[in-house]
Amino acid sequence: MATIKIVTDSSVQLTPEEVEKYNITVIPLSVMIDGTVYIDGKTITRSKFVELMSQSAALPKTSQPPIGEFIELFDQLGADGSQVIALHMTDAISGTVNTARQAANLSKSDVTVIDSRETDRGMAFQVLRAAQLAQTGADKETIISSLDRVRNSTKLYMAVMSLDNIVKGGRVSKVTGLISNILNMKVIFEMIDGELNVRAKGRGMKTVNNFMRTLIADLATKPNIKGIGISHVAANEIMEKFRTEIHAALPNVPLLIRETSPLIATYAGMGAFAIMYYTED
């Protein structure tokens, strides 16, 4: 039966139940640790990856799916005449969306590739909206228009406990001067139009706790928050603290807290976390 099918990549933060309920196809990224290649979600779990990363002699290397895998997937999904909408993480973090676009041009299927300008649960807000609308029979133009509204109302903040990984990964060109001599600084980044910008910085957890306290108080004043996600890298204790504080301030807002993907964990480093939410009028 022809319909619209939704694809995303494994940097997304979705529960297995959401993937099944909304018939979302997740194409996995791969990661290499000390010479061994693992497939995200298939040959390695998120918790096992963090364990291996903490013991690794070198920074893990992540890679997007080969173009051939994208072409094969798109052809398969569109074989019954269905259209495909593929949403992927911001190109500031990974080349996945660009590979997907190349594959879409070579596929036999009708494929629309969208740079979500987000990642993790921030991207999941868009993926879920697309999949929900697709299940109601909405057309492609309606879905894309709705995704624009979700994207424009999404906020993502990431707290990095150690800058070692983010520096080694080479994704901090805009803030090199800030961190070149202070690698033990705690930094809060904000995702703006797909790129990370420094929002706050300082030594010790006081910087992080103060930022979260202010953010939660601000969220409590917003009447139209539709969902909050927190993803982290081996930060279970502090996540439980924030869970309690968020539930107390926003008891009726859905909250998902889970370990992040290997790609984001490699990028952010041990102890890092991101909080994401979106609003809707």
Image (spheres, grey):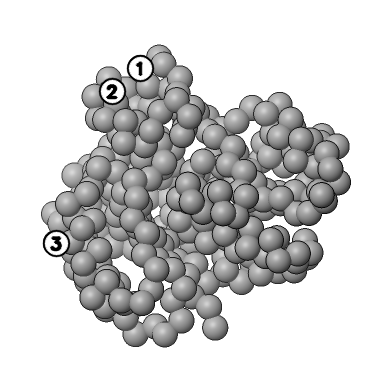
Q: CA distance from mark 3 to mark 1?
A: 35 Å
Q: Answer yes or no: is residue 193 visible.
A: no
Could you say where residue 26 lies in the image, as x and y percent from the top left?
58, 42
- Residue bearing the label numbered 3: 206
Q: Are marks 2 and 3 in contact (CB under 8 Å)?
A: no
Residue 150 horizontal/vertical position (percent): 57, 68
In the displayed structure, 81 sits above or below 194; it is above
Residue 34 found in image quarter: top left
Quadrant holding the C terminus: bottom right
Residue 36 position in % (x across, y down): 41, 16
CB under 8 Å between callouts 3 and 1? no
Taking depth in this image into account, of 170 and 80 the one nearest to the observer is: 80
Of labels 1 and 2, earlier in sequence is 1
10 Å crowding of disc 2: few (<14), some (14-19), many (20+): few
- Nearest-to-viewer mark from 3 and 1: 1
> Which residue shows up at 25% across the image and 63% down it?
243
Secondary element at tag 3: helix
Near-viewer residue (234 or 79): 79
Whole-Å distance between the Cαs marked 1 and 2?
A: 6 Å
Amino acid type, label 2: Ser
Kindly state the secondary structure of the residue where label 2 is placed.
Answer: loop
| Residue picked out by circle 2 | 56
Asked if the residues shown at circle 1 and circle 2 are in contact, with their CB atoms under 8 angstroms apart, the answer is yes
List x then y, in percent, for residue 123. Answer: 52, 55
Q: Quadrant of residue 190?
A: bottom left
The three-letter code of the residue at mark 1 reads Asp
Name the residue rendered at 71%, 34% in the picture.
Answer: 73
What amino acid type is highlighted by mark number 3?
Lys
Which residue carries the number 1 mark?
34
Q: Nearer the viewer, residue 53 or 4?
A: 4
Q: 278 left or right of 260?
A: right
